[in-house]
Image (cartoon, rainbow, N blue to C red):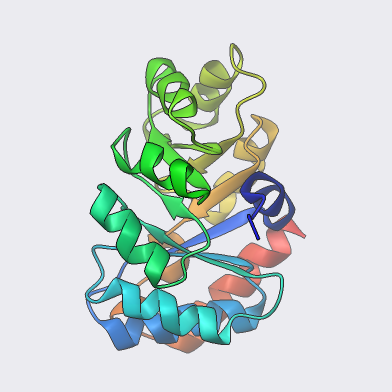
Amino acid sequence: MTVNLVAELAAARILAVIRGTDTAGAIAAGTALLEEGVRVVEVALTTPDAARAVEALRAVAAAGSLVGAGTVLTAADVAQVAAAGAQFVVTPAVVESIAEAARLGLPVAAGAFTPTEAYTAMRLGASAIKLFPVSVGGPAYLKAVRDPFPDIPFVAVGGVGLADLPGYFAAGAIAVGVGGPLVGDAASGGDLDALRQRARAYLSAVA
């Protein structure tokens, strides 16, 4: 069954980005996020054995939750994460994986920073645009890029802190992607209780 990534992101509002130095830590962090009610979780392929982490999180994710893979760059990456059960892919840039994932029916949030990149990524088959790194220009930049493309769903990613959420949603983001400010060091074996507290804070902010 094909996932409607745009509808799921718009409903969830938060995309948690897990980028760790330890496979077990990434799995533990993802499990804690899912247990706290974060519904959309991405494991970056820069995490050791990320495909195994995706597989493990798919096994524990409740119905209605989505587990995907990030930093997906190549067609080989797409094949690897699809085999692991990823339900969507995320890229950091306009790369070959976008068209390949679209060909397989795997929804893509494609990384783009400029209007040209956003338009190009959508033409390649992206479902949504991950405006990255959004902190460079903030909500005003998101609004400026979005104005000529009101039909492109934008996800604001890169340095989005808790206090930044209202500004990005007001500027038209359907969701925000949050790595460090939410996950902290939990995906590298850090404090899971602190992660759970941050997850609750983010979830209550978008409730």
Residue nearer the viewer, 96 or 53: 96
Q: Quadrant of residue 164?
A: top right
At 44% from the left and 84% from the top, the residue drawn is: 56
Q: Quadrant of the N terminus?
A: bottom right
Establish if 153 lies above or below 184: above
Q: Which residue sits furthest top?
A: 148
Please indicate, yes or no, whether residue 104 appears anywhere in the rendered image. yes
Establish if 196 lies above or below 4: below
Q: Quadrant of residue 93?
A: top left
Q: Residue 60 placed where, x, y %?
A: 56, 86
Q: Which residue sits furthest front?
A: 103
Q: Which residue sits furthest right?
A: 207
At 43% from the left and 70% from the top, the residue drawn is: 183
Horizontally, residue 76 falls left or right of residue 11, namely: left
Establish if 141 lies above or below 70: above
Please indicate, yes or no, whether residue 18 appears anywhere in the rendered image. no
Numbered marks: total: 0
Q: Residue 13 placed where, x, y %?
A: 66, 53
At 48% from the left and 33% from the top, the residue drawn is: 125
Q: Residue 28 placed where, x, y %?
A: 42, 87
Q: Residue 130 placed where, x, y %?
A: 47, 39
At 32% from the left and 88% from the top, the residue drawn is: 24
Q: Quadrant of the C terminus?
A: bottom right
Horizontally, residue 90 falls left or right of residue 200, namely: left
Q: Quadrant of residue 103?
A: top left
Establish if 168 lies above or below 9: above
